[in-house]
Image (cartoon, rainbow, N blue to C red):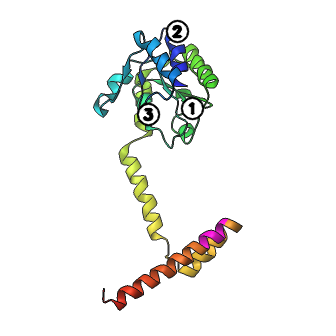
């Protein structure tokens, strides 16, 4: 998907940089051939040290993320912070990372990506203010805030009253009929195994 979308960007005369960070590189012959064809107009970069990410990103006009699965996708956050408008597949938690005026979402297929990229090229690039993007991202996220909120979640969990085994088993059974029974049985089996193991350790003087 990335190759087709980047080809479209190159035809529009946009500065494009392709980073291949997949485990096995290009996954089919068509991708390899297409990359060879674009070699004269499309610079490719391999591993980029974190300290140099910004220097690579600012060479582009749009950051294109073609992931099929994401949890948070810090890459699009870095791109927006560097002043790039983002086009991304709408998977996982991507829709919650940036406000709609900083990103176009696409379905995880070539046609939808090309359409979203076309909309970004025709209507967003000229009006994008890189400095404003950076300012907004810096106000939305900070590692200090993330760390503080994470600690708060753990503190709330620790502050909850400790449930006995019987109370936990009752909760497990309320999950769903089959799943609850499976979890209930697994929990009870693990409890029995742990008691048996502790008993053996005591008998051997451990």
Magenta stretch contains residue 204: no
Q: Which residue is mark 1?
A: 89
Q: Main secondary structure of the magenta part?
A: helix
Per the model, the C-alpha gap separating discs 3 and 1 is 16 Å
- Vertical relation: 21 (above or below) 203: above
Q: Which residues are magenta?
A: 179-184
Q: Can you give x and y, in whole percent of width and height, for residue 45 in the image? A: 36, 23
Q: Quadrant of residue 201?
A: bottom left
Per the model, the C-alpha gap separating discs 1 and 2 is 21 Å
Q: Can you give x and y, in whole percent of width and height, for residue 169 in the image? A: 60, 76
- Vertical relation: 149 (above or below) 91: below
User: Horizontal placement of 50 versus 158: left or right?
Assistant: left
State the quadrant of the C terminus: bottom left
Q: Image point 46% across, 17% down: which residue?
A: 35
- Disc on res. 11: 2
Q: Image point 59% across, 24% down: which residue?
A: 113
Q: Which residue is mark 3?
A: 22
The answer to which of 27 and 172 lies nearer the viewer is: 27
Q: Can you give x and y, in whole percent of width and height, for residue 149 in the image? A: 43, 53
Residue mark closest to the camera, 3 vs 1: 3
Looking at marks 1 and 2 on the same chain, the residue that comes earlier in the sequence is marked by 2
Q: Are marks 1 and 2 in contact (CB under 8 Å)?
A: no
Per the model, the C-alpha gap separating discs 2 and 3 is 25 Å
Residue 51 visible somewhere in the drawing: yes
């Amino acid at each position: 998907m990335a190759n087709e979308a980047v080809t479209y960007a190159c035809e529009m005369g946009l500065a494009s940089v392709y980073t291949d960070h997949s485990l096995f590189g290009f996954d089919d012959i068509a991708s390899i051939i297409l990359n060879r064809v674009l070699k004269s107009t499309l610079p490719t970069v391999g591993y980029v040290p974190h300290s140099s990410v910004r220097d690579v990103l600012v060479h582009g006009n749009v950051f294109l993320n073609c992931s099929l699965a994401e949890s948070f996708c810090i890459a699009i956050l870095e791109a927006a912070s560097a002043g790039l408008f983002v086009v991304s597949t709408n998977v996982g938690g991507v829709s919650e990372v940036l406000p709609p005026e900083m990103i176009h979402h696409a379905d995880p297929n070539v046609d939808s990506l090309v359409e979203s990229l076309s909309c970004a090229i025709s209507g967003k690039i000229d009006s994008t203010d890189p400095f404003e993007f950076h300012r907004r991202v810096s106000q939305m996220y900070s590692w200090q805030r993330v760390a503080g909120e994470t600690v708060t979640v753990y503190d709330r969990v620790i502050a909850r009253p400790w449930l006995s085994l019987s109370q936990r088993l009752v909760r497990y059974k309320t999950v769903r009929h089959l799943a609850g029974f499976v979890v209930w049985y697994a929990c009870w089996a693990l409890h029995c195994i742990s008691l048996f193991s502790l008993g053996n350790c005591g008998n051997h003087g451990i």
